[in-house]
Structures are given as C-alpha cells and as structure tokens.
Amino acid sequence: MKRQPLAKTIATACAGLGTLLAISPVFAQGYYVDEQSALRLGDAFSGGAASASDASAAYYSPAAMLLVRDELVINLAAISVRSELKGSAETGDGSIPINGEDAEADNLDFLPTLYFVRSLSEGFSAGAFINAPYATGTDFGDDSIARYQTTESEITGIDAGLSLAFRVHEKVSIGGSIIAQYMNAKTALAVNTAALCLGGLDASTCNSLGINPAELGNNTYDGSFVMEGHNTAFGFSLGTLVEFTPNSRLGLNYRTRIAHELTGSATVEFPATASGFTGLAGLENTKADGRVQFVTPESANISYFHQLGDLSLQADASWTKWSRFDKLQVESNNSTVAALAAEPQVYDWSESQRFALGANYKLSPQLTLRGGFALDMTPIDKDKTKIDFAFDDYKAISLGMSYGLTEAMTLDVGYQHTLTQKRDIDQNDLLTAGARLHGEVTTEVNSFAAGLRWAL
C-alpha cells in the first residue's frame, strides 16, 4: 500500500470518525419513526391529514381537530428491529480480513405518546401532544467486523407541541402547531490504530513504536471514539381540511424543518500498548467539547377520507426533503477530536415519497377492525448505502382494532409487519476508517402498539 506523510494520514484516515449521528437503520423514511399512534398503526397511517379518528390529529393534522371529540389518548409502541450483514470486511490495502463477530443487532424500543384535544368554542379547538418521532438505537458490539464504521448508536428526538384549529368556512378548516423538539444523539465506533500507523509508516517503524503489523485486522490496538450531543429547537406545522360532504374530505399538512446545533462531548481513548504511536501522532486520550449541525427535514402530505356506511377508506401521499441529510461535520477546538473528524461524513440522500392505503370497518357498535398497506421509498441511492443506513424501500402491512370498553373509554391495538429488506453494501472506507465492508444487509421490523382513549 502506498504510504503518505503521517500528518496527512491522520487527517484523512480518521475522517470517517466524524459520524456523531451514525444512526441505526430505522423504521420508515430516513430516521423518522412512524409508530406514534396505536390506532393509526393499524391502518398503516393511511389517514394522514384527513383522519379525524382520535386526538392524535393534534400532531398529524391539526385542522382535523374540529371533527374530534374532546379526548385524551395515551399509547405505547414496541418496535423490534433485527439487522444482519452477510458479508466480510477488510483493512490495510483491502486484502487483510478484519477479524471479529458477525455484524448483527437486535433491538427492542418502547415509545410512549400522549395526545389531547378539546373544543374551546364553535369552530375553534385546541390540542397538545408529546411523542418521539426520532427515537431508536443499534448496538453491533465492540468486536464486530463493522466496528470501524459503528459499534453503537442511539438517537432520541422528543416533540412537544400545542395545536389550534379554526373553521374559516362551513366546509374548510385550517390548523397549525408550534413544535418544541429536543434531540439527543450518541455514537460510538472503534479506531483502527494499526491501520493508521501502517498507512503512514513502514512496518518496522510501527513495530518499534509498539504496533505489531501482524495484528492488523485484530482489535489488539483498537481505540474508541464516543460522542454525544443534544439541543432543543423549534418548528411549526400548517394544514387545511376540506369537507366536500359529511362523508368525504381532503386534508393537507406541512411540517417545517427543524435545525439543530447539537453540542456535547467527545471521548477518545487508546490502549496503553499503542501509546508509542499515538504519542508520536499527537492522538491523546481526551474528553472534549464537540458540536455538529443536524436537521430534521420538512415534509408535506395530502390525504383523502371517504365513509361508506360502516366502511371507511383512506389514502395518503407524503413527501420528505431527505436531501437535508447531506453530510455531517463534527467541530471541536480539541486537536485530537479535530483530527479524528477532519473531513465530513457524506450521506447525500434524496427526497423521498410515501404512499399508504387503508380501511376501517365497524363490525359492531363496540368493535372496529382496520388494515392498511404502505410503501415508503428509500432516500438512499445504492452507491450511498452504509451499514448504519442500509434500508431499502419500506413495504409494510398493518392490522388493528378498536374496542369500546365503556362509553367513555376505547382500547386501540395495532400491529405492523415490514416485509424483509435486503440491501447490497460495498462501503469502502479504507482511506477514512481503515476498513471496507461488503455483502448484503438484511433488516426485519415488527411493530406493536396499544393505546387508550378517554372521552372528556
């Protein structure tokens, strides 16, 4: 392998470590989590901006709150995600295998949500919500073959909002929300110290510095890079609902982007056995401040609802500007952290669309059954696939029910199965993280949610 000056090697070979938000493969478009309502999970969220089924309208479609009874809703969703790489990893010049466990992760996340709607006067309603539309994590372990790309990642995004709806015409309502969004993200990965040394120095020099070239591909000299940051920022949503007839309506809703500057700490540690090299390279064990710019993107959707006796049909089409997720650049005044994040991590995603169809059938005064199907187009081109974002188009089948426990209380249950996703990956980070991953990533997702609705 051609060697380059050590200073340049450190600046480039560590660039891939600037992934503060190397978030796990999540459950819909990008890193957004659909499972924010037990009722809506059962019909694949096909009601969108036209649904007035419960108080979750305060979040999904504020203009529709005028059609919702005074209500309080609590939900709890459980989301199971299993990801596995069937392939291999190499380091050095691309011919030396990385030894370690298989890159696989099993995660079970629980997401609570709360919604409230109340009519204040004729044609004027208010609502509130607390949910977690960005909340997930992945742990591939410290010794997987993907450790130089990611070992652990976690993101928590909590939205709290106040919503208002006004009737401006007998058939037209408008609504909007003010959203406060708290975001916390953490990522951890291993530093391929042996590859750093051998990328800038010859084998005999590395050996004299305590780095045995024969250990390349093992975790003997691995360092670690852990970073966590948080921030609170604000956005809003606006929408309208047009009621063509008492049984037919069209909804539109737009949610703004929310821009964050996540600030926190970066911790870098190297084993004592590598101190000869890391001391020469100026890489010291440290905990320092770090920051990164991060955006949750804007989205828009159009939805239609039609009632046919005991049967209701609904459809939704949405658009999300995932091109906001272009690159991530960690900044720090600390020299070690700055070296390990010298270059941005490039993602270069595209806008994407989601389509859903669903139906509800009132089987009896107490029992309503529902189902739906959703197709969520991936924003990631094939050549941009990474181990932490290796999902393909998202195809989901949903089933659910609502049962009236009392006149004032209703139980909602929903289940969604995502068809198995398979995505080829060839993540060549030899010049950045000192590793290359290739093979096929398989992702399986199953979601279950239950909720209670109280009439107020």
Image: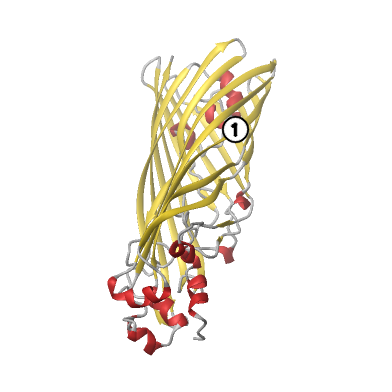
Q: What element carries label 1?
A: strand
* Three-letter code, disc 1: Phe
Residue at figure coordinates x 59%, y 24% from the top left: 64
Q: In this view, does 320 lie above or below 246?
A: below
Residue that badge 1 annotates: 236
At 33% from the left edge and 71% from the top edge, which residue is drawn? 100
* Residue 227 coordinates in the image, percent (x, y): 41, 55
Percent across and percent down for residue 291 are: 49, 52
262 to 246, vertically: above or below: below
Q: Position of residue 86 (x, y in %)?
A: 41, 68
Q: In which quarter of the image is residue 357?
A: top right
The way the protein has been coloured in the rendering is secondary structure
**Percent from the top left, x then y, of residue 201?**
44, 84
Answer few, some or many: residues within 10 Å of disc 1's Cα (few below 14, many 20 plus, some between 14 and 19): some
- Residue 428 visible in rendering: no
Quadrant for the C terminus in the image: top left
114 and 353: which is toward the camera:
114
Up the image or down, 233 lies above or below 196; here it is above
Say which of 20 and 249 sits in front: 20
Kindly identify the residue that appears in the image at 56 percent across and 24 percent down. 163
Q: Is residue 372 above or below residue 17?
A: above
Residue situated furthest bottom in the rendering = 204
Q: Can residue 5 be seen in the rendering of this structure? A: yes
Q: Point out the residue furthest to the top here.
A: 121
Horizontal side, residue 271 vs residue 304: left or right: left
Q: How many labels does the image show?
A: 1
Q: Residue at x 51, y 71 (%)?
A: 11
